[in-house]
Image (spheres, rainbow, N blue to C red):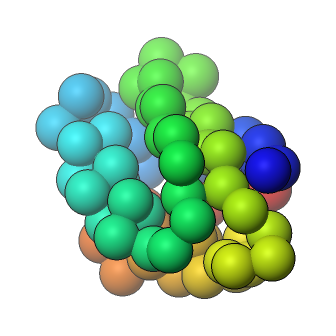
Amino acid sequence: MSEVTLEAPDISCDHCIGTIEKAVTKLESVRFISGDPETKTVKIEYDPAAVEIEEIQSAMEEEGYPAKA
């Protein structure tokens, strides 16, 4: 498993985090996701053999939350 923290400047509340969690956990091998609206970051634990970070970023962007590593 790998862990990454993504910056997502458009996060403003817990609802935003919930939307991101719902989208990202649909991806195969995402084990854990936790967001913080105050720091505008999302921490994700995932299996890099099954999902690439770009796929996670795409899932977030599709929900309106572009992210960068």
Q: In which quarter of the image is residue 63?
A: bottom left
Q: Residue at x 45, y 74 (%)?
A: 27
Viewer can see residue 47: yes
Q: Position of residue 57 (x, y in %)?
A: 59, 71
Q: Is residue 45 above or below residue 52?
A: above
| Viewer-side residue, 38 vs 20 | 20
The number of discs equals 0
Q: Is residue 35 above or below residue 9?
A: above
Q: Position of residue 1 (x, y in %)?
A: 79, 50
Q: Which residue lies furthest to the left in this view?
A: 15
Q: Where is residue 49 in the image (x, y as percent from the top left)?
A: 81, 76
| The C terminus, quarter of image | bottom right
Q: Residue at x 32, y 40 (%)?
A: 17
| Viewer-side residue, 48 vs 5 | 48
Q: Where is residue 65 in the image (x, y as percent from the top left)?
A: 42, 62
Q: Is residue 32 above or below residue 37?
A: below
Q: In this view, does 62 lie to the left or right of 59?
A: left
Q: Residue at x 52, y 40 (%)?
A: 32
Q: Quadrant of residue 29?
A: bottom right
